[in-house]
């Protein structure tokens, strides 16, 4: 039986042979760092310093992944097209992580004052489902909206925010609860 001779063109990075195990470890670290970076930027309560450094940690693993893929391409063990696409997607994800999360200040939502009544009604409904008490004052203002659909949605949302207790259809009753 003929044993297959070992090839001398095995890929290496900085003199270290690249094995399939390292490929899985590196890919796992890349996916893990992407998930942590995404979570750190999108979750409330995460330290702002962690949220700012998370994309750069992902970049470190992205660069390691890119170097590994280029080493495989140079050794003719990986498709250049696939490597380019993977490196491009990692770079694109890094760039998306650089954009800061937009936060709406308490009591403000541009969708609650949108010119389209359907958008205002849907925004009011969502505020009720989210349970965000900080939006109560903005919802009280919608009780005087010209559209009956918006007024109904705002009223239903306020009832949800008030644990199911209805204080009426007028802003006066709700204004005391949500100043």
Image (cartoon, rainbow, N blue to C red):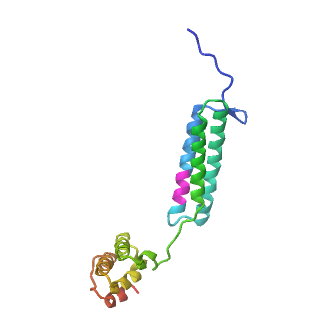
80 above or below 133? Answer: above
Seen from the viewer's position, the closer of residues 3 and 82 is 82
Q: Residue at x 34, y 84 (%)?
A: 145
Which quadrant of the figure contains the N terminus? Answer: top right
Q: Is residue 5 magenta?
A: no
Name the spot of residue 122 as percent of width and height, x first. 35, 72
Front residue of 9 and 29: 9
Main SS of the magenta part reads helix
Above or below for 47 versus 75: below
Q: Which residue is more in the foreground, 163 or 63? A: 63
In the image, residue 137 sits, relative to residue 101, either above or below, namely below
Residue 94 x %, y %: 60, 54
Please tell me which residue is depicted at 54% across the width and 54% down the height of the picture. Answer: 36
Query: Which residue is drawn at the image coordinates 54% and 47% (left, top)?
Result: 31
Residue 46 or residue 26, whichever sits in front = 26
Farthest residue in the right direction?
15
For the record, the magenta segment spans 34-40
Image quarter where the C terminus lies is bottom left
Is residue 120 left or right of 78 when viewed as pictured? Answer: left
- Residue 139, horizontal then vertical, whole percent: 37, 81
Q: Quadrant of residue 14?
A: top right
Q: Residue furthest top?
A: 1
Horizontal and vertical percent position of residue 3? 59, 13
Residue 117, image quadrant: bottom left
């Amino acid at each position: 039986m003929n044993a297959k001779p070992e090839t001398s063109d095995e890929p290496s990075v900085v003199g270290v042979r690249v094995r399939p195990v390292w490929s899985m470890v590196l890919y796992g670290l890349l996916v893990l760092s992407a998930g942590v970076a995404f979570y750190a930027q999108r979750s409330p309560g995460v330290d702002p310093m962690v949220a700012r450094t998370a994309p750069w940690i992902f970049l470190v693993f992205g660069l390691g992944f890119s170097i590994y893929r280029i080493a495989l391409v140079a050794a003719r063990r990986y498709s250049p097209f696939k490597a380019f696409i993977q490196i491009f997607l990692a770079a694109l994800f890094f760039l998306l992580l650089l954009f800061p999360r937009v936060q709406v200040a308490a009591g403000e939502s541009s969708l609650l004052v949108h010119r389209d009544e359907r958008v205002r009604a849907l925004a009011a409904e969502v505020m009720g489902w989210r349970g965000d008490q900080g939006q109560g004052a903005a919802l009280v203002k919608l009780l005087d909206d010209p559209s009956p659909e918006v007024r109904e949605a705002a009223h239903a949302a306020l009832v949800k925010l008030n644990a199911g207790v209805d204080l009426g259809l007028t802003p006066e009753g709700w204004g005391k609860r949500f100043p």
